[in-house]
């Protein structure tokens, strides 16, 4: 297993990191409990409606963090002053998801 790389450190196999699956439907909370192992190919959630997403079209916001979130959210956008710190705390999710864009 390859380590999860950030700009200034690695998370080795067995170390903890956190993932955020954002903009999902409220009913998705009923599908699984914390710590559940979900078999490959099983549904993990449903996209939230535009109404549930604060006016945004349905989509998934997936984000990783090297530090435990203080609540149920992570900053999806940061100010220019916070950018360097954010690049250290939130690694590129393509390390988990694989390539996302066709070039």
Image (cartoon, rainbow, N blue to C red):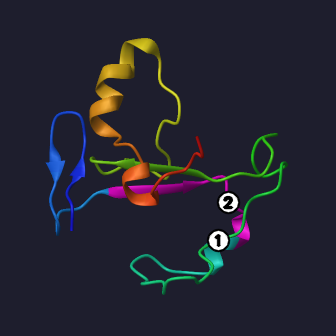
In 3D space, how far apart are the residues under numbered discs 1 and 2 (Cα atoms)?
A: 7 Å
Where residue 68 sits: x, y (%)?
A: 30, 51
Q: Number of labelled discs?
A: 2
Circle 1 SS class: loop
Instruction: Identify the image quadrant of residue 24.
Output: bottom right
Give the left or right position of residue 50, taking residue 10 as reference. right
Residue 46 vertical position relative to residue 5 in the rendered view, above or below: below
Q: Residue at x 71, y 51 (%)?
A: 59
Where residue 52 sits: x, y (%)?
A: 78, 52
Crowd around label 2: few <14 · some 14–19 · many ≥20 (10 Å): many
Question: Could you tell which of marks 1 and 2 lies nearer the N-terminus?
Answer: 2
Q: Residue at x 84, y 49 (%)?
A: 51
Say whether marks 1 and 2 touch (CB < 8 Å): yes
Report if residue 80 lies within the magenta region: no
Which label was assigned to residue 24? 2
Assign the C terminus to one quadrant of the image: top right
Furthest residue in direction front, as rendered: 103
Circle 2 SS class: loop
Q: Residue at x 64, y 71 (%)?
A: 45
Where residue 37 sits: x, y (%)?
A: 42, 84
Which label was assigned to residue 75? none
Residue in the foreground of this view, choosing between 57 and 5: 5
Instruction: Identify the image quadrant of residue 90.
Output: top left
Crowd around label 1: few <14 · some 14–19 · many ≥20 (10 Å): some
Label 1 sits on residue = 45
Residues drawn in magenta: 18-27
Residue 91 vertical position relative to residue 88 in the rendered view, above or below: below
Give the left or right position of residue 14, taking residue 46 as reference. left
Assign the N terminus to one quadrant of the image: bottom left
Where residue 9 sits: x, y (%)?
A: 15, 41
């Amino acid at each position: 297993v390859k380590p999860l790389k950030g700009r200034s450190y690695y998370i080795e196999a067995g170390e903890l990191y956190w993932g955020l699956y954002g903009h999902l439907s409220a009913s998705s909370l009923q599908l699984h409990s914390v710590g559940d192992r979900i078999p490959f190919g099983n549904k993990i959630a449903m996209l939230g409606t535009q109404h549930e997403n604060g006016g945004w079209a349905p989509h998934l916001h997936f984000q990783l963090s090297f530090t435990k979130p203080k609540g149920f959210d992570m900053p999806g956008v940061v100010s220019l002053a916070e950018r360097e710190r954010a690049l250290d705390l939130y690694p590129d999710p393509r390390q988990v998801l694989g390539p996302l864009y066709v070039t």
